[in-house]
Amino acid sequence: MSEARQWTLASAREMLGEVRERTGKAVEEVEALLVERQKLPNGTPQAAAADRTVAERVGRWAREMEALGADVKGPWLVDFDNGSGYFCWRWPEESLDYFHGYDEGFAGRRRIQ
């Protein structure tokens, strides 16, 4: 895990292109895997292997986001720590337009003025 980074709104928005590109690729891969997974009967070794592959791909995405300095808060959800809270982004949002405090979480996010 990388060292914690503090972001300005400008630096987080600058990084968002990279975050969106990598997230879009991961989402596309996971969605394709899930389509194939739905064809497999539950409880089979093939289904278990497919589930592991999906989890591994989501985990790889999370490590990529952390390497960029973002905080992963869930699948396709990242925060950028600004020292007083987080700039918050979730796939497929086009831009970084939300903020929430450290204790508020996603449900408490507000549009950046």
Image (cartoon, rainbow, N blue to C red):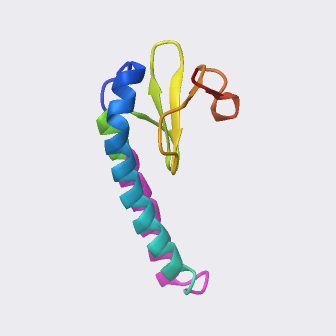
Q: Residue at x 38, y 18 (%)?
A: 6
Magenta-drawn stretch contains 51: yes
Report the magenta stretch's main SS.
helix
Between residue 69 and residue 7, name the one nearer to us. 7
Q: Residue at 34% across / 51% down in the picture?
A: 21
The quadrant in which the N terminus is found is: top left
The x, y position of residue 53, in whole percent, is 41, 68
Q: Residue 26 at x, y = what percent?
A: 39, 59
**For residue 29, side relative to residue 74 (left or right):** left
Q: Is residue 14 above or below residue 61?
A: above
In the rendered image, the residue lying farthest to the right is 107
Q: Quadrant of residue 103?
A: top right
Q: Is residue 111 above or below residue 46?
A: above
At 52% from the left edge and 24% from the top edge, which residue is drawn? 86
Q: Residue furthest top?
A: 84
As for residue 37 lying within the magenta part, the answer is: no
Disc tally is 0
Residue 79: give x, y in percent of width and height: 48, 32
Is residue 98 at least partly visible in the picture? yes
Quadrant position of the C terminus in the picture: top right
- Decide if residue 4 is in sight here: no
Q: Is residue 98 left or right of residue 19?
A: right
The stretch in magenta equals 40-62
Q: Residue at x 48, y 45 (%)?
A: 94
Residue 10's image quarter?
A: top left
- Whether 104 is drawn above or below 83: the answer is below
